[in-house]
Amino acid sequence: MNMKSFTKKGLASAAMIAVPSLAMAQDAAAPGFDEIGPYIMTTLLFCMAGFLVFFMACGFAMLEGGLVRSKNVTMQMTKNIALYSVAAIMYWLIGFNTMYPGDFNGFFAIGGPTVLDAVGVAAADAALDYASVGSDFFFQLVFVAATASIVSGALAERIKLWPFLAFVVVLTGIMYPISGSWQWGGGWLSEAGFSDFAGSTVVHSVGGWAALAGAIVLGPRIGKYGKDGKVIPIPGSNLALATLGTFILWLGWFGFNGGSQLAMGTVGDVSDVSRIFANTNMAAAAGAVTALILTQVLYKKPDLTMVLNGALAGLVSITAEPLAPTLFGALWIGAVGGVIVVFTVPLLDKLKIDDVVGAIPVHLFAGIWGTIAVIFYNGDASLTTQLLGIAAYGAFTFVGSLVLWFILKAVVGIRVGEEEEINGLDMSELGMEAYPEFSKS
Amino acid sequence: MKLIIATIKPFKLEEVREALTDIGVRGMMVTEIKGFGSQSGHTEIYRGAEYAVNFVPKIKLEIAVSAAMADQVVEAITKAARTGKIGDGKIFVLDIQQAMRVRTGETNDDAL
């Protein structure tokens, strides 16, 4: 259930073997709903949840578009649609079958391109114990795109377009699928008992680690930190867009977590999906309210951008175990996520790590918290194994990203020139402004 | 002819306009500006970091009137724009050397 490892290739190929005899027995009569119902319902779940997670790409774009300055909005939108599209192609080319290689050594197996079910596939040839390949592939694909979006937000306003996309190619085609196979592909971490239902670690922390490595190699935006080490805020251009983006991400998360039930063929499964929706919503609300109250208390005025980050941190926190907790459990797990954001955003600034949208606190720090929080409501999880998983993903993704960023920096350079950065990436890199009729500030 | 330049708090614009219309002022130029005076700036917090807002938004009025009317205009602005709190603004009165109405070619007082 929370192990996507049970899904996919392993079971699908088992079904392929089992089904022919079943099909022979049923030659006379069409299969009944008992046999095909779960397949249809789960395929439907993947399609609907996939649409919702797809929409998160829009959420990330709006959030980032609102939190960057108006002179960098066109570039941020360009990166967002490009990274989603690159991820979609890379995940088809090698990502999906690398992440779900079937029987493998548990660590690493590069797969080939994804092949869909035949047109009008017969019940006898379908993976009746699971879902159609197309729906499964699509559902998994939109997750990897979310990981890449996390990176784009943190590195906004100073990274060059093409080196960024080169990083996305490797992240979505190779790095994310390899580390994903350890858990959801039935690899060594799932064997070890690691638990990450919808990806606090597998998706969010991975994006966060890649973003952290990038932010360190790239350096802060010009003017973000004063000579005396003082933090100089750079307010975003449009908080309405940022709020819209957050609400869209919140909506998309119902698909992200709900779809990760990976089954909708029984009363228990469909009820669990609804349980996940309710918990997911509660965690987001708790994260937002916590950030609202904390910023009021700490800074005397609520900070909307922190409230938005708080909602997202609540969502990331509940993602590793959205099913087992009670609503109260989801509330406090999400609330801790909100606390983490409010305290780690200034912490990153102290370390002079410039994360434009708060992606690292939200996706990495709250992701680590969410992965640990699994142990409070899921009796099968142990703290040691959870920490092992967090460390393994951290080491692999952070070190891998660091190396990749350094290579890109040495070979092509990853940062625009000083003048280009001050003039804004929209005009200097693209020659196109997002708001050509607005006066500049 | 006098040019009266006044900076006022943005929310006082309508009251000042009404007061000036009442005493017969028939035109003015209005600009949204930022600046600082004795009010100076203030600090805000964004994502946990304090920053200074060094320039405060103000409205700048420019009014050209006959010399005889200048004191009346200054008095009307002062009365309408005053809140008694810091940042109410300033008024400057300058001489105008020449004026011309573009449409008719009228000059000086006739052009105002």
Image: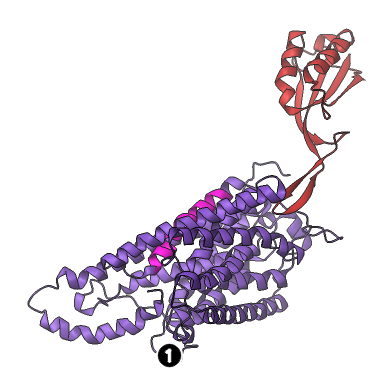
Chain colours: A purple, B red
Q: Nearer the viewer, residue A222 or A7?
A: A7
The residue that mark 1 highlights is A104
Would residue A45 be seen by someone viewing this image from the given angle? yes
Q: Position of residue A400 (x, y in %)?
A: 62, 81
Q: Position of residue A375 (x, y in %)?
A: 50, 73
Please identify the quadrant where the C terminus of chain B is shown: top right
Secondary structure type for disc 1: loop
Q: Is residue B64 left or right of residue A44?
A: right
The answer to if A244 sits in the magenta stretch is: yes
Q: Residue at x 70, y 20 (%)?
A: B14
Q: Residue at x 59, y 56 (%)?
A: A309
Q: Quadrant of residue A48?
A: bottom left
User: Dot 1 falls on which chain?
Assistant: A
Q: Nearer the viewer, residue A337 or B72?
A: A337
Q: Nearer the viewer, residue A152 or A283?
A: A283
| Location of residue A102 with respect to A378 vertically, above or below | below
Query: Which amino acid lies under the numbered mark 1 shown in the image of this protein?
Result: Phe
Q: Residue at x 32, y 70 (%)?
A: A263
Please identify the quadrant where the N terminus of chain B is shown: top right
The answer to if A358 sits in the magenta stretch is: no
Stretch of the chain drawn in magenta: A242-260
Q: Residue at x 11, y 82 (%)?
A: A25
Q: Is residue A410 left or right of residue A5?
A: right
Q: Quadrant of residue A83?
A: bottom right
Q: Main secondary structure of the magenta part?
A: helix
Extreme-left residue of the structure: A28
| Location of residue A351 with respect to A252 vertically, above or below | below
Q: Position of residue B45 (x, y in %)?
A: 73, 49
Q: Is residue A102 left or right of residue A242?
A: left
Q: Is residue A169 left or right of residue A278?
A: right
| Location of residue A235 with respect to A418 vertically, above or below | above
Q: Position of residue A329 (x, y in %)?
A: 48, 62
